[in-house]
Amino acid sequence: MKTGVYWSYLLVMFFVTYLIRVVPFVVFRKKIENKYIRSFLAYIPYTVLGAMTFPAVFYATGSLVTSTVGVAAALVAAYRGKGLFTVAICASFAALLAGML
Amino acid sequence: MKQFLQGFKDGSAIGIGYLSVSFTFGLAAVSSGLCWWEALLVSMMNLTSAGQFAGITIMAAAGSYIEMAISQFVINLRYALMSISLLQKVDREFHMGHKLLLGFANTDEIFAVAMSRQGEVSSQYFAGLAVLPYLGWTFGTLAGAVCGNILPQNVSDALGLAIYGMFIAIIVPAMKKDNHILKITLLAVGISVALYYLPGLQKISSGFAVIICAVAASAVGAVCFPVEDQTEEEV
């Protein structure tokens, strides 16, 4: 990637992310009361992360087998209520071990 | 000053958490082709995990600037809601200049801590609260980016799963707790899988695919299972 292209991407990211946080902070006076808009926004983090994770995660290590082992480990750890970093390490470690076998 | 120090202290746990999350972002960024300072600047200028991750994916795929802008808009839309909520909570001394500067630091976790504070939130408190998370995010990214370049290939391949592991750690407990979130998240995953594998739809770039999945599934969620209570969002 050329340096100029990188800066263009970076500035687009920065301006959109900055404005989305700051404009409502400066402009709005009251809360959003509409329950449909509130609900839509409440679901967004989960749908974004779900769609970003699957199916891309199965290609994350470059091997379908080790990725699948890692995903399984992550799902078990997350279901048991482990913290973010623990789950991440479990996924990576399981994939690493699967790759060595 | 006392308020600043209290905020500084309250932000320490977030800072430690961010250190580890951004470490995996740094790893992911260099493995997607950025150099260490490019990864570092992305973190210093954005301070958001899912948005940054989508951003480096679009950079790696040489996506369009429009795609970049829309993806950041949709993924970070929740911050608009949080900023509006936070606005109700800040005191009268929280002036325009403070808002322009400190609004940048309104992340999921900083928002949650600020909202859980008794009474109003002052600009000094919020500034203190943002310091350690920002430093954690910055130095974690740097460490991850540097390590990504020196680790053996099989280790860095395995660590490619780390950021997804964290995403799974966020969605799975919420899905377990809330049946509506479970259904809507599965819907988003289903659409994502369909877009990825169905012939004809594969031309859709990954950035747009995430946008389509998130907007469609969340809209279905808003219509079918609107959230009734008026408590603060803490996601």
Image: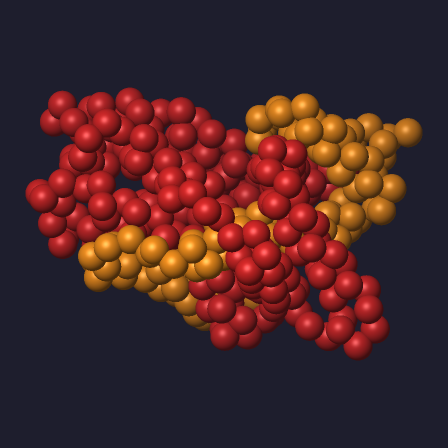
Chain colours: A orange, B red
Instruction: Identify the residue shown where x is 64% and y is 51%.
Output: B184
Q: Is residue A21 left or right of residue A50?
A: left
Where is residue B129 shown, x and y percent of the image?
Answer: 28, 32
Tell which residue pokes out farthest to the left in this image.
B93
In the depicted view, which residue is nearer to us: B55 or B223?
Answer: B223
Splitting the image into 4 quarters, where does residue B204 fall? bottom right
> Which quarter shows the N terminus of chain B?
top left
What residue is at 35 percent from the left and 60 percent from the top? A20
Residue B52 visible to the viewer: no
Image-quadrant location for residue A70 = top right
- Is residue B64 rendered to the left or right of residue B37? right
Question: Could one spot residue A71 in this view of the protein?
Answer: yes
The reply, left or right, for residue A82 in relation to residue B41 is right
Say which residue appears at 47% left-offset and 29% top-offset. B17
The residue depicted at 74 percent of the width and 66 percent of the height is B195
Residue B145 place in picture, x, y as percent? 54, 42
Of B179 and B75, the residue lying toward us:
B179
Q: How many marks?
A: 0
Choose between A100 and A45: the one closer to the eye. Answer: A45
Taking A83 as reference, is B218 above or below it?
below
Q: Position of residue B50 (x, y in %)?
A: 53, 50
